[in-house]
Image (cartoon, rainbow, N blue to C red):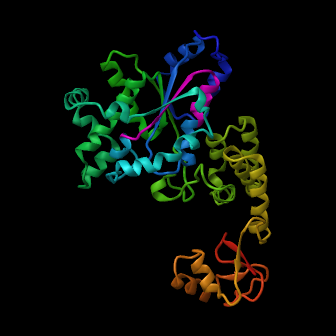
Amino acid sequence: MSSNINTDEAEIEKLLRRGVDEIIGLENLKKRMFSGEKLRIKLGVDPTSPNIHLGRSVPLLKLRDFQKLGHQVVFIIGDFTGTVGDTSDKDSERPNLTKDQIKENIKTYKNQVSKIIDLNKSEVHFNSKWLGKLNFSEIGDLASIFSVNQFISRDLISKRLKEGKRVSLKETLYPLMQGYDSVSIKADVELGGSDQRFNMLAGRDIQKHFGQREQSIITGPIVEGLDGRKMSSSWGNTINFQDTPEDMYGKVMSLNDEFVVKYFTLLTRVPEDEISIYEKEVTINPKGVKMSLAKTIVEMYHSLDEAEKAEKNWEKTFSQRGIPEDINEIYVEEGETLIEIFIKKDLLPSKTEFRRRFEAGAIKNAETGDIAPEEISETITIKYGKKDFIKIIKK
């Protein structure tokens, strides 16, 4: 028992209830937590994108909950598993990522994760450290623990096989690798989405094979993205940790009303009694509740000042149809045309795209609403997209 472990039963019950779909090994986990034992809490993330999105924050926030109670957080960056790819939530084989792509993607991972957990009190590992050393004999030993039937009976794998889609042998190794991560760091608890259930159960079997105590498993719900499908970098429907305050605020405000309470519950730590009030208010004043959600999320990943600024800009730009306070300024010489400015400053990808928007009336004088002039004779603020503004200042 560690004197630094919080054993308050109400706090533990709240941790094991909020944002949880299922707990495997619940009674044993409670017993260990109530006793004050310091547990090793594992979360692994594959760097399949340079951005960590809010869907990933569900287990990260749960990791922080454990950390606040005094338990040991173990965060694994899957630089090895990322080159293989987990297809647990995909209806087709993942494209292979190269080591260089993985290296590029992980550059800011620690900085992003530090927005939620205290890395100074955490263990951070790259799983290539142990997975890259396994030989064929050792991999064969791991593979012997499972049958092919166990793998292909999974819903998405079975569906792909029935549809005649390819299932690579490499995919069958992914659960072994994730499970071996648990052995390597001696995990007591593993966190993950409900779509990770099979892989985390594999960890229990592999731990048992190596004579370790089987980890408890906590699965969390899947979070919908901006289009209502599962939030996923491959679908581009994400709100990312690294989004600017304005983009983050705007994305939350574009969210379907039906997901607002779920976002409050899973993606924030706003007290549950406050969320109950929002749940009643959202049917009456969805915009106001959504603004509270947007401000809360921006403050989590940036600051209160940035959240208030983003809120003010959103209201001015979208609610009052005004011009945001912080827009880029471009200084131009006498005689430069608007199309020359846009192409030179990479505001649009091509002259063709400029012409398309200009002829459609989508490039306007932001102050008057009139079509923008083709030649710049004075300082002017241009709106050229839903949220895109530029102030052109004549020298």
Q: Is residue 317 left or right of residue 9?
A: right
User: For the view shown, which residue lies furthest in the top direction?
Assistant: 1
Q: Is residue 48 left or right of residue 373?
A: left
Quick check: 34 above or below 122? above
In percent of width and height, residue 109 lies at 52, 43
Tell me, yes or no, if residue 69 can be seen here.
Answer: yes
Span highlighted in magenta in the image: 61-80
Q: Is residue 81 left or right of residue 287?
A: left
Residue 74 on the magenta span: yes
Tell me, yes or no, if residue 17 can be seen here.
Answer: no
**What residue sits 36% from the left and 47% below the top?**
99
Identify which residue, 113 or 263, lies in the foreground: 113
Identify which residue, 359 or 350, lies in the foreground: 350
Residue 147 on the magenta span: no
In percent of width and height, residue 16 lies at 58, 27
Quick check: 40 above or below 302? above
In percent of width and height, residue 239 lies at 58, 53
Splitting the image into 4 quarters, where does residue 384 fall?
bottom right
In percent of width and height, residue 317 lies at 75, 68
Q: In which quadrant of the rendered image does the N terminus lie?
A: top right
Quick check: 388 above or below 116? below
Q: Is residue 222 left or right of residue 203?
A: right
Identify which residue, 288 or 338, lies in the foreground: 338
Identify which residue, 333 or 275, lies in the foreground: 333
